[in-house]
């Protein structure tokens, strides 16, 4: 009996619904951006950095994730990051993507929100023509930072409504229940932004149900019934994949 290979499987149009844009930073691009910006990485070469991608838990992923954001400093860096992801995604059959971005991971280290959004805006504006796909941003609040920062971020995001389809919640979870961000999500809801979040990745299962109850999520909010199980990912929040 013949064994099917990946070459035999037709590529199907796909929607990318759980993707952290900063987490797509490949070692080659990280070194290029580091050289462009005069940023020193603690890895001697590409092979050493690739070995660091062998994550053991969420925190080991986050440690490298935040460390590598140091190479993202100017609009072109963010544009290059997004475009590199779009090229790979389109080659894999992705036709629509709603990607997570962590504005506070950049503003907290002195990179203005305007720099982040200008760069992303450039790449996202060109994605349909360049890669024949569509894409939007879900701006996430960092749950291990002060919830007041998240609340202050919401009105600043409204300037970029053409780019941002919703808000989310991510980063280190233990001891940071979703109740802390109830007001930030309420502010986003008042402005018509969709709301999704990570829950139950390393915290207790109660975080999932707490998020659903306190933030008012339901099938009509997310466009999916995926929220009904404890192990869930944010669903598509735009009309393009309903």
Image (cartoon, helix red, strand yellow):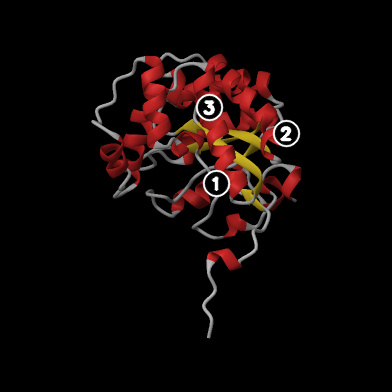
User: Does any portion of residue 57 appear in the rendered image?
Assistant: yes
Horizontal arrangement in the rendering, residue 68 relative to residue 167 (left or right): left
Q: Which label lies toward us, 2 or 1? A: 2
The residue lying at 52 percent from left, 24 percent from top is: 78
Across and down, in percent, residue 214 comes to 56, 43
Residue named by callout 2:
129
Residue named by callout 1:
18
Q: In which quarter of the image is residue 238?
A: top right
Horizontal arrangement in the rendering, residue 191 relative to residue 9 (left or right): right
Q: What element carries label 2?
A: helix
In the image, which disc is placed on residue 80?
3
Across and down, in percent, residue 90 comes to 62, 45
Question: How many angstroms separate mark 2 from mark 1 (CA)?
Answer: 23 Å
The residue lying at 57 percent from left, 15 percent from top is: 114
Closer to the chain start, of discs 2 and 3, is 3
Across and down, in percent, residue 14 comes to 65, 53
User: Does any portion of residue 139 appear in the rendered image?
Assistant: no
Closer to the chain start, of discs 1 and 3, is 1
Question: How many angstroms separate mark 1 from mark 3 (CA)?
Answer: 20 Å
């Amino acid at each position: 009996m013949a064994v099917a290979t990946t070459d035999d499987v037709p590529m199907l149009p796909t929607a990318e619904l759980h993707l952290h844009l900063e987490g797509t930073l490949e070692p080659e691009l990280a070194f290029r951006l580091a050289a462009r910006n005069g940023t020193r990485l603690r890895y001697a070469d590409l092979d050493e950095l690739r070995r660091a991608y062998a994550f053991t838990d969420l925190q080991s992923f986050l440690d490298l994730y935040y460390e590598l954001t140091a190479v993202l400093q100017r609009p072109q860096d963010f544009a290059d990051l997004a475009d590199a992801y779009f090229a790979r995604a389109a080659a894999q059959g992705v036709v629509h993507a709603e990607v997570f971005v962590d504005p506070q991971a950049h503003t907290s280290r002195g990179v203005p929100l305007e720099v982040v959004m200008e760069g992303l805006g450039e790449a996202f504006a060109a994605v349909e023509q360049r890669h024949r796909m569509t894409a939007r941003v879900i701006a996430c609040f960092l749950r291990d930072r002060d919830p007041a920062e998240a609340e202050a971020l919401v009105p600043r995001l409204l300037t970029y409504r053409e780019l941002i389809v919703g808000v989310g919640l991510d980063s280190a979870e233990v001891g940071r229940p979703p109740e802390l961000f109830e007001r930030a999500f309420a502010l986003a809801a008042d402005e018509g932004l969709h709301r999704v979040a990570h829950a139950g990745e390393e915290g207790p299962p109660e975080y999932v149900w707490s998020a659903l109850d306190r933030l008012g999520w339901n099938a009509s909010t997310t466009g999916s019934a995926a929220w009904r199980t404890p192990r869930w990912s944010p669903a598509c929040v735009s009309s393009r994949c309903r």
